Amino acid sequence: MTRKMWGLIPVLDCSQLLRLCPSQCKPCAFPITTPDPRVDSPQRTMSDQAFVTLATNDNYAKGAMVLGQSLRNHNTTKKLVALIGPHVAEACRDVLHSIFDEVCVVDVVDSGDAAHLALMKRPDLGVTFTKLHCWTLTHYSKCVFMDADTLVLSNIDELFEREELSAAPDPGWPDCFNSGVFVFTPSNETHEKLLTFCGENGSFDGGDQGVLNSFFNTWATADISKHLPFIYNLSSIAIYSYLPAFKQYGHDAKVVHFLGQSKPWHCSYDAQKGQVKGHSLSSDTCHLHPDYLLMWWQVYAKSVVPLLQQAYGDTPFNSGFVEASENGKLHEDVGEQPSHSAPPPPPPPPPQKATSEERKQRWEAGQIDYMGDDSFANIERKLDSFLK
Ligand SMILES: [Mn+2]
């Protein structure tokens, strides 16, 4: 099989291989780039390919709604599929149905199949097994998986020109790919292999990214065309670790990934002022880039909240909005504690005025003062003075 043959020369990409081929055998390389004949007609291609996301609870469902809406806003021609866990509320499912073409409930615990067997061996990997379920969407010829904490900033349908498994480097360990955005080919065979692999080897990071990197373990070296540019999975954490690069290339970003513990839905939003507020006055969410955070909330406020209001009817739900009450003060609509109309106060100051050396040491130890000295605005100002 041609596939196997190419597998023996893993360090070369397609164009390098083509250069090595004598002209008469050039057609041999075609299987790599020629699309499957079944997907020749554009009509067929449209229904044959899908963006897929996953929501295991109502919060991630909100993320999935914003992601789906952002794909629609940028006129994708692909189908949209949401995999959901059994605990997602009925009203959220209704909203997902109005944004996505297909909503599939995945209950690995109840499935009684190979996935369930694998889960019994590794109960810690429940969400991972749910995510791996995307490989069973065999009525699509190719899919792009996107985490529910991603946001699309422009049309990215060109990703479907890539082959399995294409993904962008992880900012923390760039020889691993980040599994928040990846191109894959649905296949029951691959799904079974992944489950077996998972049951036998577990995951080195406790999640799907560890499993997928161990399984697709030639990603870092075999084929550069499977390395998606970083702009298809720009994590807000990476912005701070290499800010000059962000200033240089950030405006090309196509997908933002709100990686890490704090998510956009942990904040609240003042719709009147169009401002995002940190959750419970913590500085936790401050590493999320303010512009992208605002974009997420704008999509959510404009397109998702009306659908949620319709779906929930008279039942109260947490919209995440802060509203002006009669006395003119702001309060969160279902929040436990009132938020202040003034911006959150900075964290307690360090014992004495930190010298530039001390600040550098703290930065390198990961103690970043997002609200104060190391705030985005301050770093930007400093950079601008260097780059002038
Ligand atoms: Mn994520």
Image (cartoon, grey):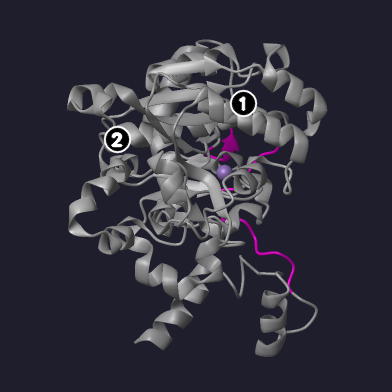
Q: Residues within 10 Å of mark 2 (few under 14, many from 20)?
A: some
Q: Residue at x 79, y 31 (%)?
A: 122
Q: Earlier in the sequence, mark 2 or mark 1?
A: 2
Determine whether label 2 and label 1 are within 8 Å by CB.
Answer: no
- Residue 79 in view, yes or no: yes
Residue 74 is one of the magenta-drawn residues: no
Q: Residue at x 26, y 63 (%)?
A: 19
Quarter of the image where one finds residue 194: top right
Q: Main secondary structure of the magenta part?
A: loop
Q: Which mark is residue 228?
A: none
Residue linked to disc 2 = 73
Q: Position of residue 246 (x, y in %)?
A: 43, 68
Q: Which mark is residue 192?
A: 1
Q: Residue at x 49, y 31 (%)?
A: 53
Quarter of the image where one finds residue 317: top right
Horizontal side, residue 383 vs residue 156: left or right: right
Q: Residues within 10 Å of mark 1 (few under 14, many from 20)?
A: some
- The segment highlighted magenta reads 328-349
